[in-house]
Amino acid sequence: MTAVDGATVGDALAIHDAVARAPVGSDLTYTLRRDADVFRVALPVRRFDRRDFATVFAPMLAVGAWTVAVGAALVVARPEVATLHAAFLVCLTLGLSLVTGPDQYGPYRFVSVFYLALALFPASVFHLSAAFLWWPSVWTRRLVAAVYAPVRGRRRRARRPALRADGVSAAPLPRVLRAREHDRALRRHR
Amino acid sequence: MRPHEVHGVEARERPVVVEHGADATGQERHAERGDEPGKLVPRGAIALEIDVQRRLRPDHEARRRSERPRRRGDVACQRALGRRTRARRRPAAPRPPPADDANRAREGCASFPTPRRRRRAAPPPRDRTSAARARGSRGSATAASAALPATTSAVTAAMPATLASCSRAARRPARPRTCRRRDRAARPFGATPRGSKSRHTRRSRAADERVGARPAPRRAARRTPPRARSCRPHRWRPRTRVRGAKYRPIAGTSHGVTSAWPRIRAYAIVAAIVRFRSPAAAMRNRGTSATQASIHPHGSRSESPCRPPATHTDEDRTTDPIHRSARLRPPWWLPVLLVPVVAVTVLCTRDALTWVGRPFAGFLFSTTASWSRSGDRRGAIRRSGESSGAS
C-alpha cells in the first residue's frame, strides 16, 4: 500500500492515522502495488465493533493465554518431569505468538516478540521430541547433539541428578545429548 | 502396620501345612522342634514369626533397604502365599547341604541355585552356634529364634521351611553397590529393556535419597577391552529368564513388542498429569500384581520380599516425600518466564480492546496477512490506467 486517498503513506501507522481521520461510512481509496502493477481499491471506513473483536482478536488472545497457562500448570504440577518442561516451551512459544497476534494489526509494539516466538516454535517442538525417552541411533544422537551444541554450555554432571527409576529428571537438556556417555555405558554393560 | 499384614506378608488365618523335608535345613529345624508332618498352623503365626525375626535382627533396617522384592511368580513365594497347589511341588529330597551352599541352605534356600560369585563363601560351620556366630550381624532365622521367648518359640517352631526361604534377606547378603551402579549406568536414558533383570535388582536413586544412603563410588575402569561395538540396543538385551527364578518377568510393555522402549509409556504420563502422580506411580497401580512388583522401586514401599497385591491409597500418594516435595517446588525459571508473558498479554489485550469503536479501513493489514470481511470483496478494483472517472 503506497497511498491513501492520494496521500503517500510510509508505514502502517500512517495508514491508521489516515483512516482514523476519515468519517465512518466515507470511501477511502487505497493504492496498492504488486510488482509492476498498481491497483486502487475504494473501501468504506467502518467502525470496529465488538463482533469484529470477538471474531478476530478474542480467539487469538484467549487461545494464546490458555495455552501458556496450561503449559505452566503442567510444570507446576510435575516440576521434575523434563518432558513437561519441553511441553511448556512449546506452549509458551505458541501462546506468545497467538497473544501478540492482534498487535500485528496495530499498534505494532511486539512485532519482534511475535516473530521470535514464531521462530522458536519449531525448535521447541524439536526439544519436546528430544525430551521424550527414546533410543535413537548413533548418528541421530550426534545430529541432536550438533543441534544443541550452541546452547549446551558448561556441563554440571556432578550436580545434576541421575535419571530416576520412574523416568523423570530435572535435567534442563534432554539426556539424549549424552551420546558419548551412552556409548560408554553400552560398552560397560557388555 | 495393619494387623493382617506383617511386612507385606498377608497373614490370613488360613491354615497351612508344615512342610517337612522341603530341604535339608527344613528337616533339621522341624526335627529339633518336634513338629509332626502335616501339622496345621495358622498363617498369622507364620507372619508373626517373620515379624519377630525381622525385629530381632540388629541391622534389619539396613538389610531391608537392600532387599530385592520377591515376585509373586516365584515358586517359593507362591508357596508361602498358598497359591501353588501341593501337587505341583517337587517331592522333598533331604540331602546334606554342599559345602559352598552352607550358609544359604541353612536358611532353607537349597532349592535355589547358587550365584557364581557366592560359591567362594565361608566353609559351613560345624554346629548351629558356630553358624549363628559365622553369620554375625546379618542375623538369621535360627539365631533370632534362639533369642525368642518361650511363647514365641512355639510359633517359631511352626514356621515351614518354605516360608523361611521366602525371606530374601535371610538367604542372600546385600548386593554390592557397584553392581547397582553398573546397572544404572547401563541405561543412561532410564530405559529398561523388556525382561531386564537389572530393573529388579537395582535400587532407584529416589530410594537412595530417601533412606539417606551414601552415594555409590564410581566403578573402576574396566581392564578387559570391550567387545565389538553395536549400535542396536537389542543386542545386549538381558535374558528374559532370570537365574534362579521360575518366572518370566512381566514388563510394562506388551510381550510382543521387541523394541527397547521403557515401561513408562504415554498413557502413564497422561495419567500422571491427570492424577498428579509420577509416571512410575501411575504404572505401579496398573496391571497385575506381578507387573506392580516388577516395577516397584526398591526400598520405597516394599518391606518384604513377598509382596502382596498393591493396595496403594490416596494416603500413600500424599505421603510420598519425593513427589510431595517436588510438587511444592516449581522451577525458578517459571515465574521468570511467566511474568513478562503476562505483561505482554495484558498489553496486547488492552491494545486490542482500543480497536473497539474505532474507525478502521475495513480490513486489517499487517506485514504478513490481512483480515477483512467477505463484503469487502465487492470493492471496485481497478487498474490504474483503465478508467479514470471511477475514482
Image (spheres, rainbow, N blue to C red):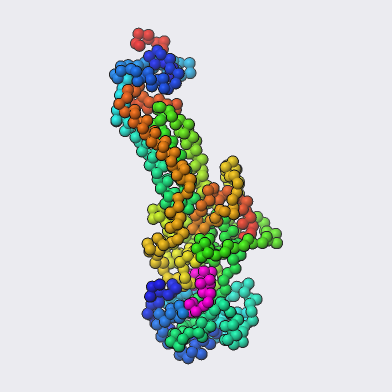
Q: Is residue B55 magenta?
A: yes
Residue B227 in picture, x, y percent from top left? 67, 58
Position above or below: A169 against A108: below
Position above or below: A59 against B188: above
Question: In front here: B129 or B331?
Answer: B331
Question: In front here: B237 or B206?
Answer: B206
Residue B171 in picture, x, y percent from top left? 55, 76
Residue A141 in picture, x, y percent from top left? 58, 47
Q: Is residue B119 visible?
A: yes
Left or right: residue A47 versus residue B336 is left
Left or right: residue B380 versus residue B63 is left
Q: Is residue B59 magenta?
A: yes
Q: Quadrant of residue B311?
A: bottom left
Position above or below: B335 against A11: below
What is the quadrant of the N terminus of chain B in the image? bottom left
Q: From this viewpoint, which residue is outermost toward the top?
A: B389
Q: Is residue B102 visible?
A: no
Q: Quadrant of residue A151?
A: top right
What is the quadrant of the C terminus of chain B in the image? top left
Position above or below: B364 against B265: above
Residue B390 in picture, x, y percent from top left? 34, 11
Q: Quadrant of residue B100?
A: bottom right
Residue at figure coordinates x 62%, y 74% from the top left: B118
Question: In front here: B210 or B112?
Answer: B210
Residue at figure coordinates x 43%, y 50% from the top left: A76
In magenta, the rendered stretch is: B53-74
Residue at figure coordinates x 49%, y 35% from the top left: A116
